[in-house]
Structure formats: C-alpha cells, structure tokens
Image (spheres, rainbow, N blue to C red):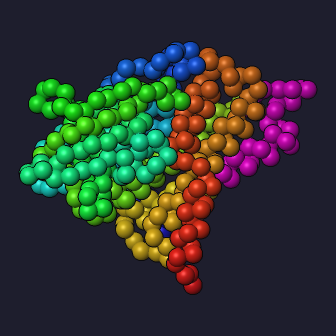
Amino acid sequence: MDFRFSEEQQAAVEAARAVFGGVAPDSVPSPSLVPGAVADDFDRALWERLAGADLLSLLLDEEYGGAGLDAIALCLVLRESAKVLARVPLLESCAAAAAVQAYGGGELRGEVLHRAGAGELVLTVAAHGRTGHDPAELAVTARRDGDLWVLDGVQTAIPWAHNADFVLVPARTNADRTVLALVPRVHEGVPLDGAALAEQISTAGERLGELRLESVRLPDRYVLETDGAWPWLRDLLTVGTCALALGLGTAVLSMTSDYTGKREQFGHPLATFQAVAVQAADRYIDLRAMEATLWQAAWRIGTRAGGALPVSGDVAVAKIWASEGVRRVVQTAQHLHGGFGADTDYPLHRYHAWAKYLELSLGPAAAHEEALGDLLAAHQLG
C-alpha cells in the first residue's frame, strides 16, 4: 500500500501554504472584546487569492474549470487554512459545489459551478437542523406544487449565511425522502419571498444565520432529488470539519512547544520538566490519531470504496478523535501557557474559541461512540 499523497494533492498543499502564509489569525477584533460579530463579512481579499490559486475549484471537473481532485485534497487545504484561522467559507462552498456537480442537473451545474470555482458565487450549507441537536433533514419540509418546490421550516447556525449567494438546505418530502434545495439569498435582485435570515454569533465571534422558510417556492432545477446526496454531503462536511480541527490543533501544539521551550522557571525551560513534556507528548499522540482517522474517512468518501463497515463508521471514528482531540489540545495549551493563554493580545485565546466552535459542530464523542456501536452490532466483522 502507498500512503503517500499524490503529486496533485501535494501541489494543492503548497499552493495553500503560499496563500495562507501571510494571513494573521488576529486580523479582526477579538471575540472576547466585542459584543457582536467580529466582522460583517468574511475575508474577501483572501477569498480572491484562493480563487486565483484555483483552490476553490479543487473538487470540480475540468469542464467547470476545476482540478478534479478528491476529499483528501480539500482536507489538506482546510488543514492549512485552520492553522491561521482563515475567515473564509472554504469548506462550505467547496462541499456544496461538489454536491451540485455530483447530484445536480446540467442546467444547474452550468449556472453555478464555473462561478463558484472562480469565487464569484459563494455557497454554504444548512447542516444543523432547527436546534443544532436534531437531524438537519427533518427541520425543513419540501413538497411539489406543479413545476415548483415549496419549502417550510427553520435551519439554525448556518455559517456565512449573511454573505453567501446560495444556501444548500436538506429537506424532507411527503414520501419520507431527503432532497437538497439550493436556496438563493436573493432572487432576481430582491430578497427571496418567504425567506428570513436572523443573525446569530458563534463562539468564535463569527456571524451565523437562522434561516426561516415560509412557503418558499423554488424552480425544479434548484432541488437535488438523488437518494444519498445528503448523507454524502454531510460526511464531506464532517471530514472537512475534522481537517479544520487537525490544522488548528497542529498550530496550537506548535505554539505551545515554542512557548514552553523559551519560558523558564527555576532556571530551566518549561519544556524540560517531565510533567510538561508528558502532557505535550499526549497531545501529539492525539493529533496523530486525528490525522490517521481523518485520512481514512476522507479516502472512503473520495473513492466510495467499500469496507467492513459503511463509510459512516469511518466518519464516526474521525469525529470521536477530532472532537475530543482538539478540546484536549487547546486545554493543555491553556494550562501550559498560564496567564498568557487568556491574554487578548496573544492569539491562543482565539484558537480556543475556534476549537470550541469546531467541537460543538462535531458533537460529543459519546454520541459518535454510540453510533459506531450500533454499526458494529449491525455488521458482523471477520
């Protein structure tokens, strides 16, 4: 077996490092110091640089101006973005575009994909349901009315919703099937009739949106009806979030290593104390486990390869390690930094806030362990 990344995947990493190399994680006000959102919009200048480096079209086919790469390539780029807390809808827009490419009709692909890959259209996904605890596909209903679809319901905590051009919304039909509806934030230059967007604030200080849909009517081409579209997109979003957790954790452990190597107590660097070294070593093991389980899940999603368990099993394992691992990494970093960890002039507190948002997005490890147990019970191994 060859576990090395391909030349194309490595080239994507190099391009990402070139783009993210000059990004400062404290480019906006601290979420600890402002009552509302840290900014009204995402980093548009960085978004343009990502488009110029062809990093927004990684998953798109050549006919849409893309590189035709896979989920691993996207996760590699996301890992680099999280190291600097890049404020861009890279995961959501790329994942939504990939879903449109895989499951949308020709007319919709022609309307959306070229412009999304060029950064001209921004897409996001409503993945948290009505409350953040219930399945997202049950929060909105979809029914046919002639040549149109009618949507009703609420989706909460949608990232970048106030600045995206389209929100991809899972919805349940009367036939108990899940479809994906591409809901425009504005339609023909005016706000979409029946759709309302309320502001919410994440733990990282970013604007989220609560989307209310009341008899919103969409043309048939904006609805992806293929079975399996939502589970595939949900899994892609999940492994992308795990990649963000891995990148953030990697940056935090590096920051901690630098600090404890320079900070002295009793005439010796903190890093030379056994208790400090053991804690750092445990967090390094967390990161390596997060990495191994991430690439396994991303490979299953990208190749659609079979296995002893469905792909949801690999995704559950990746979520267990990512949600627990990123929490442990930032908590250890805060402990080893002492008071510096809470200093708003020092970036660690930002990483902690972002880590908490990622942890909440992934959900508790216990729930994923239960889901994994159910899969193991339903599929005899060996």
Residue 267: name its quadrant: top right
User: What residue is rendered at 56% in x and 81% in y?
Assistant: 381
Q: Nearer the viewer, residue 262 or 218?
A: 218
Q: Is residue 10 visible?
A: no
- The spot of residue 2 in percent (x, y) is 48, 69
Q: Looking at the image, which residue sits at the far bottom?
A: 382
| Residue 94 shown left or right of residue 100 in the figure | right
User: Magenta stretch containing residue 271, yes or no?
Assistant: yes
Q: Decide which of 108, 290 is in the foreground and name it.
A: 108
Q: Main secondary structure of the magenta part?
A: helix
Residue 131: % across, % down: 46, 41
In the figure, 39 relative to 315: above or below? above
Quadrant of the image for the C terminus? Answer: bottom right
Q: Nearer the viewer, residue 278 or 221?
A: 221
Q: Is residue 36 depicted above or below 56 in this figure? A: above
Q: Is residue 342 visible?
A: yes
Residue shown at 59%/49% (left/top)? 364
- Whole-percent x, y for residue 147 in the image: 8, 51
35 sits left or right of 197 in the view: right
Whether 134 is drawn above or below 166: the answer is: below
Query: Which residue is at 37% across, 31% downward?
Result: 209
Q: Is residue 226 above or below residue 257?
A: below
Task: Identify which residue, 183 or 57, lies in the foreground.
Answer: 183
Q: Position of residue 347 (x, y in %)?
A: 59, 24
Whether residue 314 appears in magenta in the rendering, the answer is: no
Q: Which residues are magenta?
A: 260-286
Looking at the image, which residue is at 36% across and 59% down? Answer: 232
